[in-house]
Image (tube, coloured by chain):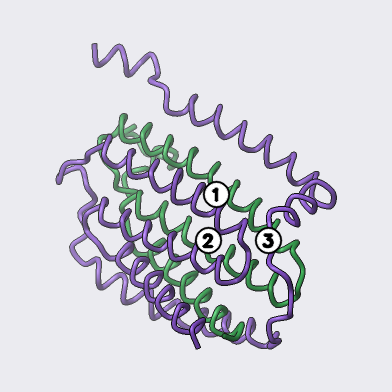
Chain colours: A purple, B green
Amino acid sequence: MLEISIFSILAMFMLGGSIAMISNKQTLFSAFGFLVAMIGLAGMFALLDSRFLALAQIMVSVGAVVVLSMLTILTINAKEENMPHEPNKFKWIIVSSILVTPFTLLLYKTLSSVHQNFSEMETVSSKVVGKLLFSEWVLPFEIVSILLLTAMVGAIVIARKSDKTSKEQS
Amino acid sequence: MTPDMFFLLTSLLFSIGLVGLISRRNLFVVYMSIELMLSSVNLLLATFSKVLGDASGSVIALLIIAVIAAEAAIFLAMIVHIYRENRTIDSDDFDKLKEGNSNA
């Protein structure tokens, strides 16, 4: 019973946050909705007994990704005329919701046809995850490290001021 | 607490992300919708990890978190670059690569 109430509260947080994210006009408020959804997701991971995943979610998604996107939003600080002009935004949202609803039902029906109960398993501690990561999943782990390095270098190269634009501004 | 509830939540979150991706033109909202869809898949992996009693699902979710971080870095750098050139964050304005477009 306690678990169900915790689940309901977290689910409300996540759904409310994500709906606020896609429907807000101000970009920063969307980022706050996204932050609430990510914190709710970390709580969901904790509820599913994946302790290490919850910690990683809080550290990476909340601590790095959301903060980075908020910093970018505040740095860019787009004025009203630079924002996209979306007069019938809610019409678009309603139409696309109607379009997406059958897909949602299909997804839910397919997933729930698995229909098993939760198995009795011990908490996924960092020890278990670390052992799996360095035995069975060591190749994907290395590939992810290369991907992160490439993304870092690529982000620096893309965001650097090119010579042309810096000359124009000076 | 049954897996069904988690499946319902996952499908709803994925669909909300899809709706945001389709209907909004603000680049930041598009970016956050993609992140939300990836995160809902993460939640699904963690749920299956618990349903099947196998910790490998958690490991895959961990790798996906790393991919999310990489995607965030690239996407935000691209937004900064594009904003510096065009002074807008409207995704409809980014048609430089379109054929026969001469305003670039």
User: Which residue sits at x=25%, y=71%?
Assistant: A90
User: Which residue sits at x=47%, y=76%?
Assistant: B12
User: Neighbour class for label 1 at 10 Å: few (<14), some, many (≥20)?
Assistant: many
Amino acid, disc 1: Ile
Please determine whether, in this image, residue B39 is positioned above or below residue A101: above
Q: Is residue A91 left or right of residue A161?
A: left
Amino acid, disc 2: Ser
Residue contact between numbered discs 1 and 2, judged by CB atoms under 8 Å: yes
- The residues tagged by marks 1 and 2 sit, at their Cα atoms, a distance apart of 8 Å
Q: Nearer the viewer, residue B20 or A111?
A: A111
Discs 1 and 3 lie in a common subunit? yes
Please determine whether, in this image, residue A138 is positioned above or below residue B9: above
Amino acid, disc 3: Ser
Label 1 or label 2, whichever comes before in sequence order: 2
Q: Nearer the viewer, residue B101 or A65?
A: A65
Q: Chain for mark 3?
A: B
Discs 3 and 2 lie in a common subunit? yes
Please determine whether, in this image, residue A136 is positioned above or below residue A16: above
Q: Tell me the number on the disc at residue B39.
A: 2
